[in-house]
Every structure is written in C-alpha cells, then in structure tokens.
C-alpha cells in the first residue's frame, strides 16, 4: 500500500506510534474498530509521522466481556445445526478477529521503527481489515439474537504476541505464518459447513475473510523473507528454528497448500515440522 503525502501546507503533529498506542488502549470493541481503521486511514494519507516515540503496552485494553478462559475450559459447541452452536461458532470467529486487530496494530507499532514504512503500511492495512471482519461478525451475531461478549472466549490468542515481543522475526514466524496460516487451512471446511446449512450470508463473510487472510499471511511472509535475507540465513531453516523456539502448539495437517502457496508459504516451510 502506497502512502500519500499530507501536502506542503499540512503539519504532521502526531506520531504513528502514538496513534497506534491509543487504538491498542481502546477497550470497547466498536470504538477499537473505528480507531484501527482511522489510524490506517490517517497513515495512508500522510497525516501521521514515521516516528516511534512511545512504547506499546504489554497488553491491549479489552472489554470486561467476553470472559477469557484457558483452551481446556472452553465449552463444546455442539452440532452446527442448532442455533446455540451457530452462535458459538460466530462468537469464536468474532473473538479471533477482535484479537487480530490488536495483533496487527502491535506488529506495526512495536516493530515499525526497526523495519520501514512499507512494514507499517502493510500491518495497519491488516488491522483495518481485521476491524472490518470483526464488524461483519458482530453484526452476524446480532442477527442471531446474540452479541460479542455473550459467551466465554479463548484466553491464549495474545500469548503468541507477548512471547515474541522482543523479536520481529519470531513474531512474523508465529503470528502470520503459523496462526493466520492455520486460518487458511480451517476456513474452507467451515465455509462448506455454513453453505450446507443454507447460510449464504455467513458463507459470504467467510469467503471475504479467507481472501483477506491470504494477503495477510503474504505480508508476514514477505517481511520475514527480507529479514532472513538480511541475516544471510535460509528462510525455511530460520522459520523452523523460531517456530520450534517460540510456538507452544503443534502444526497439524491437513494444510490448504494452494492458499498457503498463494501467501508465499511453500511446503518447504512446514512439511517436516507438522505432527
């Protein structure tokens, strides 16, 4: 994404880091969506300075609800045909997208200073996409008579960010190239199940998310490859080392090889590390 000039008469008075920090410290989901998209828009228009004069928070601000639980305490969704199970699915997806807003904002704000303007542009555009995804899913929940925060949610999604807060290569390896890439694997099956249930609107939302997530993983892969090249290391070997060091989970097939390849992730990266 190219960045426009603010114009010769414009005064750029706020740093991009300050604007990102403010968005991260916004707890209300709807307001955070607006804040994330506003930061991306102002950056694209050249209204924010490429300066990193404030630190990112260790943890973003989140609403009181949903209640955050460890993965092993999350309730089972049940069969998709029931309204309860459908609400549980959309709520889970909404929570993933909500945390993804913060993951993208933190990526740009925490590491933008050591990377470059293209890096900031890419991940602020990701944050704006995730905000749109969350808004679509929140409205979907409302159409089913529920809302975001009505059910408990997975507490572990931010752990990958916190554990890689000191190393941009590790963050790229784990968040876009493992966690978001996993979305490329599982979303098509979910989309088929939603279509089979006759939910054309829900299928359209998932198709939009899948298309965007390919681009998000591609951004992560692109910047990871640049880092590996700068270090003089083979990207596949570096990625495997960083994933082995920083990722607590396991990489499980089946993989959506075509979507991963479209995102720049060849099988050379993940075949031998899959369990």
Image: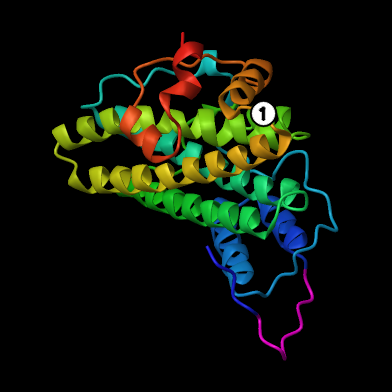
Q: Is residue 30 left or right of residue 238?
A: left
Q: Which residue is the site of mark 1? A: 233
Q: Is residue 222 left or right of residue 80?
A: right
Q: Position of residue 131 (x, y in %)?
A: 50, 53
Residue 189, picture quadrant? top left
Residue 8 among those drawn in magenta: yes
Residue 78 among those drawn in magenta: no
Magenta residues (range): 6-14
Query: In front: 256, or 262?
Result: 262
Residue drawn at 60 percent across, 46 percent down: 104
Residue 156, picture quadrant? top right
Query: In front: 150, or 265?
Result: 265
Residue 171, picture quadrant? top right
| Above or below: residue 200 compared with residue 163 | below
Residue 88 visible at all? no
> Circle 1 sits in a helix, a strand or a loop, which is it?
loop
Query: Farthest residue in the front direction?
Result: 232
Instruction: Indicate how the structure is coloured in the image.
Output: rainbow
Main SS, magenta region, reads: loop
Q: Position of residue 13 (x, y in %)?
A: 79, 76
Query: In front: 175, or 27?
Result: 175
Residue drawn at 18 percent across, 45 percent down: 200
Q: Position of residue 119 (x, y in %)?
A: 63, 53
Q: Position of residue 121 (x, y in %)?
A: 60, 59
Residue drawn at 76 percent across, 77 percent down: 12
Query: Farthest residue in the top direction?
Result: 275
| Above or below: residue 14 compared with residue 255 | below
């Amino acid at each position: 994404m190219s960045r426009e000039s603010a114009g010769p008469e414009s005064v750029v008075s706020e740093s991009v880091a300050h604007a990102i920090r403010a968005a991260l410290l916004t707890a209300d989901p709807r307001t955070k969506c607006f804040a994330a998209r506003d930061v991306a828009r102002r950056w694209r228009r050249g209204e924010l300075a490429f300066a990193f004069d404030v630190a990112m928070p260790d943890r973003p601000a989140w609403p009181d609800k949903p209640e955050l639980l460890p993965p092993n305490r999350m309730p089972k969704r049940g069969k998709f045909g029931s309204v309860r199970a459908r609400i549980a699915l959309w709520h889970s997806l909404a929570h993933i997208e909500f945390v993804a807003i913060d993951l993208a904002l933190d990526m740009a704000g925490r590491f933008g200073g050591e990377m470059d303007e293209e890096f900031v542009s890419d991940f602020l555009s990701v944050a704006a996409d995730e905000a749109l995804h969350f808004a679509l899913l929140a409205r979907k929940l409302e159409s089913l008579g529920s809302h975001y925060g009505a059910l408990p949610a997975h507490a572990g999604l931010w752990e990958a960010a916190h554990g890689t807060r000191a190393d941009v290569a590790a963050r790229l390896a784990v968040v876009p190239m493992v966690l978001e890439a996993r979305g490329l694997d599982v979303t098509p099956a979910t989309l088929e199940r939603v279509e089979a249930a006759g939910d054309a609107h829900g299928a359209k939302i998932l198709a939009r998310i899948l298309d965007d997530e390919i681009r998000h993983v591609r951004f992560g892969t692109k910047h990871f490859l640049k880092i590996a090249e700068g270090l003089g290391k083979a990207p596949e070997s570096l990625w495997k080392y960083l994933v082995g060091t920083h990722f607590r989970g396991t990489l499980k097939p089946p993989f959506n090889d075509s979507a991963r390849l479209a995102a720049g992730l060849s099988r050379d990266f993940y075949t031998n590390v899959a369990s």
